[in-house]
């Protein structure tokens, strides 16, 4: 059993990163296929943003974030970008209970609620990357100090 958990521990960061990337790629691409559902959701909550161009910008940001996650580049910054995107969705969830059916969630509410988990994934990816960078930092400082002697 120990080897199973060891394997899970090794793959977990990659699985989280790639699954978030896949979800972002998919939902971002769907915004280009048909922006209407997102535009209608925006119209009910933030009408000044309810136009196709804004939906396309959101889709482009999600697709860019997905490619950066797949590539493993700038992970903590991509995590922050995702948090901003998901915070916008959760803002709609909180401010328009009539659209979401809160507390007995309708389909739109269920769609928006998933962003809580996606935000947690983005936070975890940013935190893991920051921790990885921090753990590398002291080694670089120690090595540079040893070279100065």
Image (tube, grey):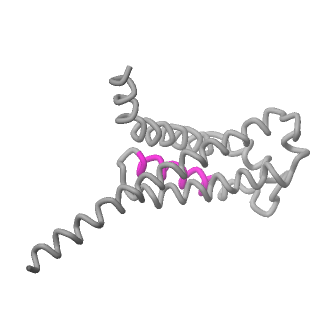
Task: Place residue 101 in its image quadrant.
Answer: top right
Magenta highlight on residue 115: no
Q: Nearer the viewer, residue 52 or 59?
A: 59
Is the residue 77 above or below the residue 29 in the image? below
Q: Quadrant of the N terminus?
A: top left
- Image quarter where the C terminus lies is bottom left
| In-image side of 97 versus 120 (left or right) | right
Q: Nearer the viewer, residue 59 or 144?
A: 144
Q: Is 63 in the magenta?
A: yes
Report the side of 69 relative to 42 (left or right). left
- Residue that appears at 41% across and 41% down: 13
Residue, x 47% and y 47% (percent of image)? 66
Q: At which x and y percent is residue 123?
A: 54, 52
Q: Residue at x 17, y 73 (%)?
A: 144
Q: Is residue 55 left or right of residue 105?
A: left
* Residue 64 shows up from this direction: no
Q: Which residues lie in the magenta part?
A: 56-69
Give the prevailing secondary structure in the magenta stretch.
helix
Q: Is residue 8 visible in this depiction of the protein?
A: yes
Task: Indicate the quadrant where residue 11 lies.
Answer: top left
Q: Is residue 54 above or below residue 1?
A: below
Task: Estimate the x, y position of residue 7 in percent, counting from the top left.
Answer: 35, 28
The percent position of residue 141, horizontal first and vertical second, equals 23, 71
Farthest top residue in view:
1
């Amino acid at each position: 059993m120990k080897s199973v958990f060891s394997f899970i521990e090794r793959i977990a960061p990659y699985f989280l990163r790639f699954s978030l990337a896949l979800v972002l790629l998919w939902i971002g691409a769907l915004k280009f296929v048909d922006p209407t559902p997102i535009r209608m959701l925006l119209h009910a909550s933030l009408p000044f943003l309810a136009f196709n161009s804004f939906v396309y910008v959101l889709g482009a940001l999600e697709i860019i974030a997905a490619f950066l996650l797949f590539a493993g580049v700038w992970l903590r910054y991509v995590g922050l970008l995702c948090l901003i995107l998901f915070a916008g969705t959760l803002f709609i969830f909180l401010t328009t209970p009539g659209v979401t059916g809160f507390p007995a969630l309708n389909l739109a509410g269920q769609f928006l609620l998933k962003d809580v988990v996606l935000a947690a994934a983005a936070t975890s990816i940013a935190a893991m990357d920051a921790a990885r960078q921090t753990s590398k930092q002291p080694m670089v400082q120690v090595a540079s100090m040893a070279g100065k002697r």
